[in-house]
Image (tube, rainbow, N blue to C red):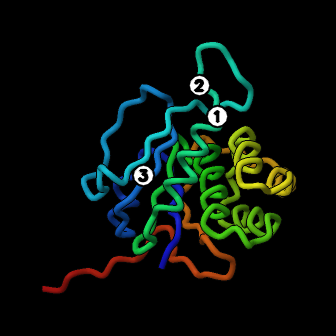
Amino acid sequence: MSYLIVCRLNQIAESAVLHGAREMVSLLAENQDFHRPAVIDQARHLRLGLNDISIVRPGLTAPGEAHVDQLIDFARSWDQTAPLVVHCWLGISRSPAAAAITALAIEPDQDEMALAQRLRAASRFVTPNARLIEIGDAMLGRGGRLVTAIKSIGRGADAYEGSRFCFAIRPGEDVPPATPHRRKKMG
């Protein structure tokens, strides 16, 4: 089953282990250091150095076409035999935007409005980064439909940090709960 696990930085190791992920996309500030979970294959870890901004600001790295191009290429090369972890600092803006772009890169024959509504249903906290969405819309040839769809779900609920959620690549696919139940060992 192929799906995305969208989470904040402090949930990546637990998310990867619980869901059996071997690949990951990190959207963090350029020089932000963190430990890649051992279960994530180093060769299948995409690190995108960008700040969570929608307007270019001096001293910060705004999301750009090169970032989105790398994300699209990585998404299309994902073998989908195990879930893909997509994370940012808080799991509210950059990673949900990357999840939407990834879903459309892999499954382009889906409706943008339905995708945005699935994203909102998955998490009431998400407010996808507008600049990433605009660039993704253009690079995937969506004609402004992805931008319109994401705007239609509005700003997410106020939160200090997001909660991990699972997101289906294709409409109608079931995904497991964000925190699957583990069986206790007997004995």
**Could you give the CA–CA distance between mark 3 and mark 2, rounded to whole angstroms?**
24 Å
Quickly name the residue at label 2: 61
Instruction: Inspect this view and state whether residue 127 appears.
Output: no
Q: Which residue is found at the position 18% from the left and 86% from the top?
A: 186
Q: Nearer the viewer, residue 88 or 42?
A: 42
Q: Which of the two discs, 3 and 1, sits closer to the camera? A: 1
Q: Which residue is found at the position 50% from the left and 33% from the top?
A: 49
Q: Which residue is found at the position 41% from the left and 45% from the top?
A: 10
Residue 98, position in %: x, y? 61, 51
Q: Is residue 144 above or below residue 171?
A: above
At mark 2, the secondary structure is loop
Q: Is residue 132 above or below residue 1?
A: above
Is residue 35 toward the left or the right of residue 83 in the image? left
Q: Which of the two discs, 1 and 2, sits closer to the camera? A: 1
The amino acid type found where label 1 is placed reads Gly
The amino acid type found where label 3 is placed reads Gln
Assess whether mark 2 and mark 3 are in contact (beta carbons under 8 angstroms).
no
Q: Nearer the viewer, residue 91 or 80?
A: 80
Q: Nearer the viewer, residue 19 or 97?
A: 97
Assess whether mark 2 and mark 1 are in contact (beta carbons under 8 angstroms).
yes
Labels 3 and 1: the sequence-earlier one:
3
Instruction: Inspect this view and state whether residue 178 appears.
Output: yes
Residue 162, position in %: x, y? 58, 50
Quarter of the rendering occupied by the C terminus: bottom left
At mark 1, the secondary structure is loop
Residue 126, position in %: x, y? 68, 51
Numbered circle sitting on residue 64: 1
The amino acid type found where label 2 is placed reads Thr
Count how many numbered circles sit on residues in the image.
3
Mark 2, other Cα within 10 Å: few <14 / some 14–19 / many ≥20: some
Quickly name the residue at label 3: 11
